[in-house]
Image (tube, helix red, strand yellow):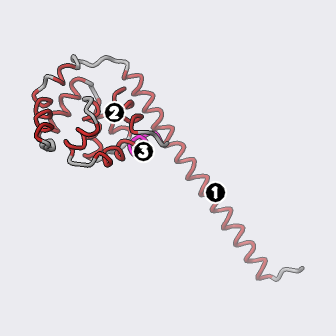
Amino acid sequence: MILTNREIFLLIICTVFYITLFILVIKANRQKIQLLQSRLDNIHAMQKMAVIEPRQDVNNIFSSPVYLHIKQYLNEGRSIADEDWKTLAEVVNDTYPGFTEKLFSLYRMSDQDYHVSLLIKIRLQPKDIATLTAHSKESIASTRSRLYQKVFGKKGSTKDWDDFILSI
C-alpha cells in the first residue's frame, strides 16, 4: 500500500500533535509533583515545629471569655458572631503560636475552612461545629475531607484532617 502525499502529511501532523501533547502532559505532571513536594516539605517543617509546646496552658482556651460565648451559642443553637471569630483566632494563636500562618501556608482557605479548623483545634465535635458555622454535619464532614485532600494531595478521612489540625 502506497501512501499519498496528503496521507503522509496528515500522518506527520498527527505524530507532531501527539508528541506535543505527550510533552505537555509530562510538564504538567512535573509541576504537580513539585507542588506536592513543596506542600510535603511545609508539612514536615510544621510537624517539626509542632513538637514545641504551646506558649500558654491549653486550659486558658477553655476558660477564656470567647470559649464561654461559644458554649452559650451552642446552648442557644446559634452560630458564632463575627467578632467572636476574631477573638477565637487570637486565643488559639496565643496558645499555639503561628497556627493560622501554618494553615494558610499550606492552602488558601476560605473563611468556612478556617472556622472549621479553628473549632477542631479547640476540640469541638462535628455536630457542634455544624451548629456554630450554620452548616450541616454533612457539609462539615465534606469540608474536613476536602481540606485533607487539598493539602496532602490524596484522599483522607475527616479524622485524618482532625488529627493533622490537632498536631500543629
Give the amino acid at mark 3: Lys
Question: Could you say where residue 15 lies in the image, as x and y percent from the top left?
Answer: 72, 67
Give the amino acid at mark 2: Lys
Q: Looking at this view, is 54 or 158 the one in front?
A: 158
- Which label belongs to residue 150? 3
Question: Could you say where residue 60 lies in the image, as x and y percent from the top left?
Answer: 17, 20
Earlier in the chain: of badge 2 and badge 3, it is 2
Looking at the rendered structure, the secondary structure element under dot 3 is helix
Looking at the rendered structure, the secondary structure element under dot 2 is helix
Magenta stretch: dominant secondary structure:
helix
- In the visual, does 69 lie left or right of 166? left
Q: Residues within 10 Å of mark 1 (few under 14, many from 20)?
A: few
Q: Nearer the viewer, mark 1 or mark 2?
A: 2
**Magenta residue span:** 146-153
Q: Quadrant of residue 98?
A: top left
Question: Could you say where residue 127 lies in the image, as x and y percent from the top left?
Answer: 26, 40
Residue at x-position 37% and y-position 18%: 51
Q: Nearer the viewer, mark 1 or mark 3?
A: 3
Farthest residue in the right direction?
Answer: 1
Residue hosting label 1:
23
Looking at the rendered structure, the secondary structure element under dot 1 is helix
| Callouts 2 and 3 close, C-beta under 8 Å | no
The answer to whether any part of residue 59 appears in the image is yes
Earlier in the chain: of badge 1 and badge 3, it is 1
Q: CA distance from mark 2 to mark 3?
A: 15 Å
Residue at x-position 51% and y-position 38%: 37
